[in-house]
Amino acid sequence: IAIALPLLLFSINVKSALNMAGDTMKGMALALLSVIVISTAGAVLFTDQIADVWQVAGMSVGAYTGGSPNMAAIKTAIDGKESIFVTMVTYDILFSAIYLVFVMTLGQRVFGLFLNKYQHKNDSAEIDYAGMEHLADETANGYKKLVSIKLLPQTLAALLSSGVVVGVALFIASLVPETYQSTTTIIGITSLGLAASFIPKIRNLANSFQLGMYLILVFCFTMGTMTDMSIFTDIDLGLASYISFILVGSLLMQALLCKLFKVDTDTFLITSSAAIMSVPFIPVIAGALKNREILLPGFAAAIIGYAVGNYLGIIVANVTRALTGA
């Protein structure tokens, strides 16, 4: 994950993403705000039912603003307990699957009752990818390029650049007190990866995004094998209720905010999915909504979620720790 995060961040043109996304960035900001508020409020409500609820809050914010890699990164940053992490992964798989099915089947119909309808901006059915075509290629062809001999030098350069980012972050972390080293490492990797994306030669390296996504998919598969089925027979009602509270609460809060700020139904659903489900599911959601026009803005929003998820998760973990007196 340490290597994968910079690879993802290298590939995004932050300026183009912000310019092209329009209401998508507004919707994503509302999604992030909703997750933060509901997670923090939930931590206070469930403090007597969940041990180390501040750790759960921080990792939840990472998971539901960025993705599973952020949850793992925040676990490292806050020295979270392995048992809490594994249980969260298990419940996250279950409840996120339920969330995904709802968004794909009923979401557009239900929220379309009170949110505005999406106004298509491009009648030609052609999509302006704003220099980020690589994010839109979710097919097997995009990953076949990873074994291309012709692109091997650029792939290795991207991997080496990511290694340099991780190395520099570790060096910076070694300069601070041991208590803060994990947090400093994760913040350093995220910040340096974002900074490197502003360098055109690094941003344009072929296969950076695909390699990062491949590593993340391997990580997600590995986490899937960690699923402890006995947790379902001996369910932790407090933790399960808290995660459900975050998913349902943040969805409803974002919907209300989108109504207030005049964000349309499709943009609401794609940004909610970008926060809760992250990058790999954006094509699935866009397909279910029958709206390819929001595909790339959805990718951009999800990548930005990856970028800010670590910061937000660490902040929420420390704030809830103070609020709950842990």
Image (cartoon, rainbow, N blue to C red):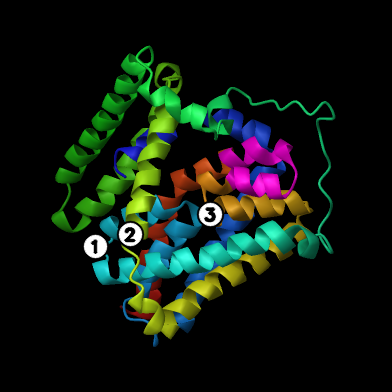
Out of 137 and 111, give the one closest to the viewer: 137
Total marks shown come to: 3
Say what secondary structure mark 1 lies in. Answer: loop
Out of 167 and 221, give the one closest to the viewer: 221
> What residue is shown at x 45% (from left), y 43% (from top)?
307
Q: How far apart are marks 3 and 1 (CA)?
A: 24 Å
User: Picture coordinates of residue 235 (x, y %)?
Assistant: 40, 82
**The image quarter in which residue 122 lies:** top right
Q: Look at label 2 and name its amino acid.
A: Thr
Q: Distance between the residues labelled 1 and 2?
A: 22 Å
Q: Mark 3 points at which residue?
A: 277
Per the rendering, the mark at residue 79 is 1
Q: Name the residue under label 2.
A: 225
Between marks 1 and 2 in the image, the one whose residue lies nearer the viewer: 2
In the image, farthest residue toward the top: 150
Dot 1 or dot 2, earlier in sequence: 1
Q: How far apart are marks 2 and 3 (CA)?
A: 19 Å
- Start and end of the magenta stretch? 282-299
Dot 2 or dot 3, earlier in sequence: 2
Per the rendering, the mark at residue 217 is none
Q: Look at label 1 and name its amino acid.
A: Asp
> What residue is shown at x 52% (from left), y 68% (from top)?
95
Q: In this view, does 272 lie above or below 321?
A: above
Q: In this view, does 196 lie above or below 49?
A: above
User: Picture coordinates of residue 133 (x, y %)?
Assistant: 58, 25
Between marks 3 and 1 in the image, the one whose residue lies nearer the viewer: 3
Q: Look at label 3 and name its amino acid.
A: Met
